[in-house]
Image (cartoon, rainbow, N blue to C red):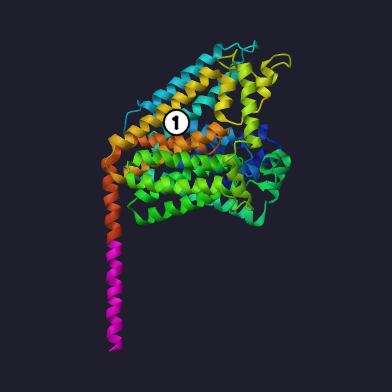
Amino acid sequence: MAYTQNHGGRVIVLFLLFLLALYQFWAVGFTGFAVVASIPAVLLFIYLAIKGKDTLFWYIFTMNYFVMGLQRYGFIPLPITVVMVLPQIFLLMVLVFTNRPTKSSLLNPMSIGIALWTFYLILQVFNDTCGLPLSIGDWLMNMNFFALYFIIAFAIVNKVVNTPGHIMRFLRLTAYFSIAAAFWAWRQQTFGWDSAENAWLMGGAMRTHIIGGSIRYFSFFSDAANFGCNMGAVAVAFYILGLTSKLRKDKILFLIAAAASTYGFFVSGTRSGLMCFIVGGALYLILSKSFKLTIFAAVMGGLFLFFMMGTTIGQGNMQIRRMRSAFDSDDASKNVRDINKEALAKYLKDAPFGMGININEESIPAFNKFKVVYETSNDSTYVFFWQRTGIVGVYIFAFMNILILLGGSFVTLFRLQNKMCKGIAAAFCCAFLAIQAGGYANHILLQYPNLILFYGGMAIVYLLPAIEKDFIAYEDNYIAIQEEKKRLRLEKKKQSRVKTWFSWK
């Protein structure tokens, strides 16, 4: 305060320079002046990040959810790498160099799986399948995209979200953000697309978002497939959390988020969203070890399948019609994907390690047979990795995810005793399997906000046994506060009745 009083003119000039830098980034991109003018803001950001590491994480977590929507509306004048990736790398470096303590061992099935996948990608530098010159720049860029993001999601969540309070904030923010995403889809469905969304659709997205008279709503996500799969996965998690939470306010919040997310995956028109929900729910039947719940789910599931496959009820609704096509073996779009996979299999049988991630894919010459592989639509994260890292790579990637899930399920079943902790672990495991089902059918696993949300969630699962006692104390404290508020309300109500009776007398 004293500095601004004595040097107010300098502060105003620096602030104006920063605003001018932002305008230049937005209007003309990177220029020398814009970079120089933004240096004071960057230094301030670094200082605040070092002083408040937790705050930087919550900035990353929030931007991770909204960055695609903000970019669509032109609110982010910088490349997403600058806005998202650099802060994550910087936070990871700060956490490492400041020796931020961890509550549990970093050596677990998740870290082993990610390390194995990363090691395979490092070996990809020697892949010469396409016969093209090695590009270290492209290899490093793909290493960031294919491996570093997983490492960051695991490491920073493990280092920061390692207290009961932070875990509950992680869950509550996800619930609020999911409700906001569902609300935005409702706005699109009720009032239509705004100018920014229309411009995005006219830019080429219309082809995949208006299909045979069915409209697929995408909220502020990258596309409808990403939105629908995310909503299907988090819906499962929030139903589980709503069932297992003892804290009344959280129970209500999670159930509202679950209902909103269910609405979200239906209006997305993404059949995979429904599959995500079904797969995640099926895993919970195993983790819950509840015979009654299994019988109830089997009956409800049977009725749902009969509704979808054995009737035409609701066929006039475009979303129901779209979801019903998930059970149609003759659906045209599903058949196109199968045809693409068959075509890729013919070319990739000679490339067990894929085209490689150490080349500039766009420079593959037309006479090279792997040009066809590059140009064939993948429609799936697993097919995407199959193209680039081969059948060996996709098996290692699948093994990494299976290892993460099995380890997390083991923690849920055998290492946790507290009902709330088991509920949180089960919710993350079911959501993780659900988003994997979405990634098998759509190219969404590497899209925002899924990496930090679901892989970070699994990092929390492995952390829970080490802080279960802290969680019990946290839960008991909140329950005590909840009961005290309930007691005070009852006393106040009783006193008001007594006053009413005396006034009547």
Residue 194 visible? The answer is: yes
Magenta stretch bounds:
484-505
Residue 54, picture quadrant: top left
**Residue 193 lies within the magenta run:** no
Residue type, mark 1 in image: Leu
Residue at position x 41%, y 46% from top?
A: 297
Residue to which mark 1 is pinned: 92
Residue at the extreme bottom of the image, as rendered: 505
Percent from the top left, x then y, of residue 424?
37, 43
Q: Is residue 119 above or below residue 496?
A: above
The 10 Å Cα crowd at callout 1, few under 14, some 14 to 19, many 20 or more, is many
Q: Nearer the viewer, residue 394 or 142?
A: 394
Q: Is residue 12 left or right of residue 504?
A: right
Residue 226, picture quadrant: top right
Residue at position x 66%, y 17% from top?
A: 370
Q: Is residue 74 above or below residue 145?
A: below
Percent from the top left, x then y, of residue 457?
42, 38
* Magenta: main secondary structure: helix
